[in-house]
Image: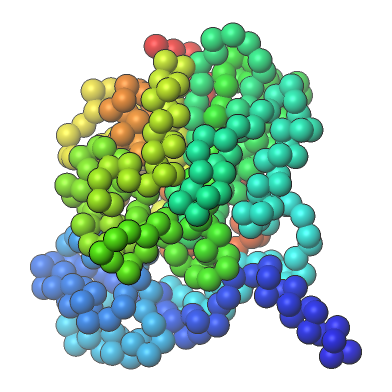
Amino acid sequence: MLVFLALVTVALASAHPPSEHFEGHKVFRVQVEDENHLDVIRELASNYQIDFWKPDSVIQVQARSTVDFSVKAEDCVAVEDLLEQNKLQYEVLISNLRNEMEAQFDSWSRAAGHSYTKYNNWETIEAWTQQVAKENPNLVSRSVIGTTFEGRPMYLLKVGKAKRNKPAIFIDCGFHAREWISPAFCQWFVREAVRTYGQEIHMTELLNELDFYVLPVVNIDGYVYTWTKNRMWRKTRSTQAGTSCVGIDPNRNFAAGWCEVGASKNPCSDTYCGPVPESEKETKALADFIRNNLSSIKAYLTIHSYSQMLLYPYSYTYNLPKNNVELNSLAKAAVKELASLHGTKYTYGPGATTIYLAAGGSDDWAYDQGIKYAFTFELRDQGRHGFLLPESQIQATCEETLLAVKHMAGYVLEHLY
């Protein structure tokens, strides 16, 4: 009996990221009203190891906003005292991060193999990319656009019916390692494309007339690390001379107002922009692919979490894009489509004013390359689970997001340029 239990424990350990480290950690949501409150948040950030969830770093916290962050168990009492002394209103979103991590998985019995309604580790996703291409040769082909810092191949799926000179839409997932719902959507999108082609009129037309380039996970090394070592890891896993701190924020690593605002030059920061733009093998591979296919790529969609937002350029400046009115009405219509299924409410608008200033993002970069339709999705939820969205919400999240994406693709098809 003991041997059997030991085996079960080993199986579970390999299937789930270790969570003991997060026992007693809490996630707070704090109302930041004014400059005095901002000073308190800065003081917290410099005196304790605070993991900012939203916004991504202390430099992006603004007056008249809320901030979500997690605090280590041993610091919770001191943090709560400081908030109360300075009369900051707060709520505890997650009272024990370890429990929340374990509750993400609907059941502890992990079926081996790939599932569209569970979180899949990289090994499983990698095998799935091969399988889905092999099973649907008339609709899906797989290529490698580069390798990660740790040497993993970056697989890209091209989804669509073969035809010469087709316009394309590029969709990527998994920029930030801990945003697990994001890769789940890329997998779901491919599944629905092959499942409903020839059955559902809208998807059939989209796949006949457009190609979809789907990059299921951008930051593969980081994603693997969230499964094996630290569930809350965000950045890449690259190392560099002169610092023991690991990783760069891939969504601060593009040449779009690079490192000017909402990014850090400190290698230990979660929003470190890197030594130069495209310093990361992953961001360079993505940018090279888009540059090489610029004539055909008409839209760029990048999938993140959490917040329930649909953002368009710019994030690195408060200036509005030339086609701001068009992007705004397309976002409005897409968000309406999304809400039609489960009533999930999204906000939308230019990144800088809708969420926060942040330079070096892939959406701004793609737009500045001449891709007129560039959008960032921030998927569910609004902070109740944050990055730890339960598996029970994967299907609903993906279904509603697919409605928005199909609407946008249909619009792009009617407005080719």
Residue at screen point 42% across, 15% down? 295
Quadrant of residue 8 within the rendered picture: bottom right
In which quadrant of the rendered image does the N terminus lie? bottom right
In the rendered image, the vertical position of residue 408 relative to residue 259, given as above or below = above
Quadrant of residue 415 within the rendered picture: top left
Residue pushed farthest left?
35
Rendering coords of residue 237 (x, y %): 43, 59
Out of 412 and 6, give the one closest to the viewer. Answer: 6
Residue at screen point 26% across, 37% down? 255
Q: Is residue 75 left or right of residue 410?
A: left
Residue at screen point 18% across, 72% down? 42
In the rendered image, the vertical position of residue 82 relative to residue 387, given as above or below = below
Residue pushed farthest top?
164
Rendering coords of residue 3 (x, y %): 85, 86
Rendering coords of residue 112 (x, y %): 78, 60
Rendering coords of residue 11 (x, y %): 75, 73
Out of 270 and 105, give the one closest to the viewer. Answer: 270
